[in-house]
Image (cartoon, rainbow, N blue to C red):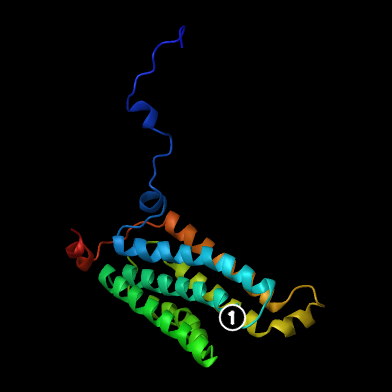
Amino acid sequence: MIVTPKITLSHKPHQFADMRNFLGCFFNISLKGEVWGWALFYGGIVGLAFGSAHYHLKPDDSRVMWDTLPMMIAYSSLFSSFMAERVGQRAGLICLFGLLLIVLLSTAYARTFNDLQLCMMFQLIPCIAIPAMTFLYPPKYTHSRYWLWAAGVCLLAKFEDALDKKIYNVNRYLISGHSLEHLCSAAIPVLFAIMLIHRTIRFQRLGDLKERP
C-alpha cells in the first residue's frame, strides 16, 4: 500500500466484459408476463430434480406427489409462457394463475380419492395444445420451431414411460422405458434454453404495446 498508488472508487471496476442481463438479454424475453412463466418453468424443473430423486429412492404412494407436483407446475408455466408469446402477456398471466389453481385442485383430488387421472390428463394437454396452437397463432419470436421439437420430445417420453417393461425386455435389460423417459424429459428445458438464447423479436403485438407501462 505504501509503494503503490491509491485505488479510487470509479465506474471502471463495474464495467465487466459480459454485461448481459440473465433474463433480459441472455434469455431473450421482452415482456414481464413472460418472465413469470419462464422463471416458474425452470423453478419447477429444479424442484422436479429433487422431488423425482426423493420419489425414486423409495417409490410409493406417499412420495409420488413430490414427483408429480413440480412437473405439473413446470407444464403450467410453460403453457402460460406460450400463451404470453402467442396471444399476449395478459392472457399468459391469466393462464398461469388459472393453471396453477388447477394444479392444486388436481393434487388435492389425487390425494383425496387416490386417483391420478386428472394429473395425467393435465400433463398431456399442453403436449397436444401447444402444437395445435402453433398453427393458429403466429410467433412473436424467431426459432419458434423449438416449441414443436419440445412437444415431440415430450410425447416420445410419454410413450417410453407407457412401454416401460416392453422396452426393457426388448433391449435385453440394458435400459428401461422409464429411464429413457427421464433422459428425453431432460432434453426439454435444454431445447427451450437454446431457443431463449438465440431467438429475436419478429414483431411487437399491439396488445403488448398497450399493456406496457
Q: Quadrant of the C terminus?
A: bottom left
Estimate the x, y position of residue 200 in percent, counting from the top left.
36, 56
Determine the residue located farthest toward the top in the rendered image. 3
Q: Secondary structure at mark 1?
A: helix
188 horizontally vs 136: left or right: right
Q: Can residue 135 be seen in the rendering of this structure?
A: no
182 horizontally vs 71: left or right: right
Question: Of the residues shown, which amino acid type is indicated by label 1?
Answer: Lys
* Residue at 69% from the left image edge and 82% from the top image edge: 164
Estimate the x, y position of residue 113 in percent, counting from the top left.
51, 93
- From the viewer's perspective, is residue 65 above or below residue 3? below
Q: Can residue 147 be seen in the rendering of this structure?
A: yes
- From the viewer's perspective, is residue 5 above or below residue 50? above
Estimate the x, y position of residue 90 in percent, counting from the top left.
26, 71
117 horizontally vs 177: left or right: left
Q: Residues within 10 Å of mark 1 (few under 14, many from 20)?
A: many
* Residue at 34% from the left image edge and 63% from the top image edge: 34
- Give the quarter of the image for residue 33: bottom left
Of residues 138 and 195, which is closer to you in this image? 195
* Residue at 34% from the left image edge and 79% from the top image edge: 98
- From the viewer's perspective, is residue 10 above or below residue 28? above
Estimate the x, y position of residue 101 in percent, counting from the top left.
37, 79
* Residue at 42% from the left image edge and 70% from the top image edge: 78
Please give the count of numbered marks on the rendered protein.
Answer: 1
- Give the quarter of the image for residue 137: bottom left
Per the image, the residue denoted by label 1 is 158
